[in-house]
Amino acid sequence: MFKRTLLVLILVLFSLPPGSVVEGAEKPNILWIIVDDMSAQFSSYGEEIIETPNVDALAGRGVQFNNAFVTAPVCSTCRSAFITGMYQTTIGAHHHRSGRGTEKIILPEGVRPLPEIFQEAGYYTTLAGWPIRADERLGKSDYNFEWDQRMYHGADWARRKDGQPFFAQIQLPGGKLRGGTQESAERMAARAEKTFGNRTDIKQVSLPPYYPATDVILHDWAAYLDTVRETDRVVGEILAKLQEEGDFENTIVVFMTDHGISHIRGKQFMYDEGLHVPLVIAGPGVKEGQVRDDLVEHIDIAAVSLASAGIKIPKYMQAQNIMSEVYRPRRAVYAARDRCDETVEHLRSVRTQDFKYIRNYLHQRPHLQPNAYKDGKSIMKSFRAAGANGQLNQVQAYLLNASRPEEELYDLHNDPHEVNNLADDPAYAGVLKQMRKLLSRWETKSADQGVAPEPAIMFDSDMKVYVDTLEARRRPIEHINTIKNNIELMRKWAGEGK
């Protein structure tokens, strides 16, 4: 009788579709740790100046992805993508912090945020910062579309019912801890000195070749590395909470950042500094000590999480279960950048293991378009001052050009910093044609909505407040006029303001 029962159970298991679980089986908890504004400057990824023992240990318990990339180099569009498992350009959430005006962005019919799906499967869903607040205040969401706050039960998974699995997100400030000024960077360095007994030594800092080694930029980079150390320390505290509450062994932990470092050509840019992120997955069912070099996209954590919980992945979802035994590695990854704050932009990129192709649709504009968020940072002021004083070399000064090339092509093996544009090199004409085709196919297949103008009513009320605030802060009139011209351009594209 026992053998017959066992045989029936085995047959049932093998007949289940991928991602299914047997009713009553213990489901794993899923915990996402999402960090703001941080690239892969962790020691397990090769950073030598600092040590990050907690993230390193997490990677040792599972799999570290060396080639993970976001589909958008700015937070709200990136977050709108990973919480749905969809490209932000497909669901109309591609403009940074859009839908805050009169009109709202509604997800396409059938597309749902992940927490709703987890709730239906019986999961307790949470969204928190760190430390988790006793008042159950939710952590950072920053989705561009309309969503129901009831898709989160609260902030602390410890409040769930006995035996109930949880899907939790903890949002950490990461690189934002250093702020944007010399004073705030110094405060971060002092904080690190108090916490760790020392601050990162600027004499050890090695900048990418496209940044000048000004005192301001060196100190900022050192303070940034201190934010990485602080983030690693907090990761240790989060994992300790899991252990103290008895959830460690049955929790799949996903560690990732929402995009790369907020720097001159990092955040908001299509270079790897803005798109490349750390991604570590560890927990039950994940083989320890793996390091993978295949290309993955940040939206894939949606599919991985559902499959790990035994929940069927919706057919509409563009994310892929990169942990599946039948997963076929991607040939390429894609990214898009559109309006950020008041700055109108339209950039697209495709990246293979060997090459990066960037299409500058608004190529008549400079790389460093006016943007109040970035222009107010000390590093940007220092960079522009170095340019005005003739202290930038050719690799660095190109960012200050009045316009951009329509296309950029980089050989990533020989030029990992993406400074030698090969788009006009006849020797790479074949590669250029191939990359163009890849990008064009993706834009069509994914139904990229970036070609349509953004209605002014999506942002008009916010932008008016934004411009008024800049005027109150006595920003240079040239900057304010540029912002107003951008807004007027968007109105014209939308057929308004005539």
Image: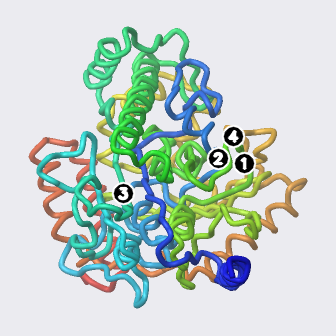
Q: From the viewer's side, name the closer residue of 169 and 245.
A: 245
Q: Position of residue 277 (x, y in %)?
A: 55, 46
Instruction: Give the colour scheme shown.
Output: rainbow
Query: What residue lies at 78% left-to-right and 47% top-to-bottom?
Result: 411
Mark 1 or mark 2, whichever is nearer to me: 2
The residue indicated by pointer 2 is 63
Give the CA distance from mark 2 to mark 3. Answer: 20 Å
Q: Amino acid at mark 3?
A: Ala
The residue indicated by pointer 3 is 168
Give the CA distance from mark 1 to mark 2. Answer: 7 Å
Q: Is residue 117 left or right of residue 106?
A: right
Callout 1–callout 3 Cβ contact below 8 Å = no
Q: Amino acid at mark 2?
A: Val
Mark 1 or mark 4, whichever is nearer to me: 4
Give the CA distance from mark 3 to mark 4. Answer: 24 Å
Can you tell which mark lies on residue 289?
Answer: 4
The residue indicated by pointer 1 is 292
For the residue carrying disc 4, how many other residues have a C-alpha within 10 Å: few (<14), some (14-19), or many (20+)? some
Q: Position of residue 390 (x, y in %)?
A: 52, 23
For the residue carrying disc 2, how many other residues have a C-alpha within 10 Å: few (<14), some (14-19), or many (20+)? many
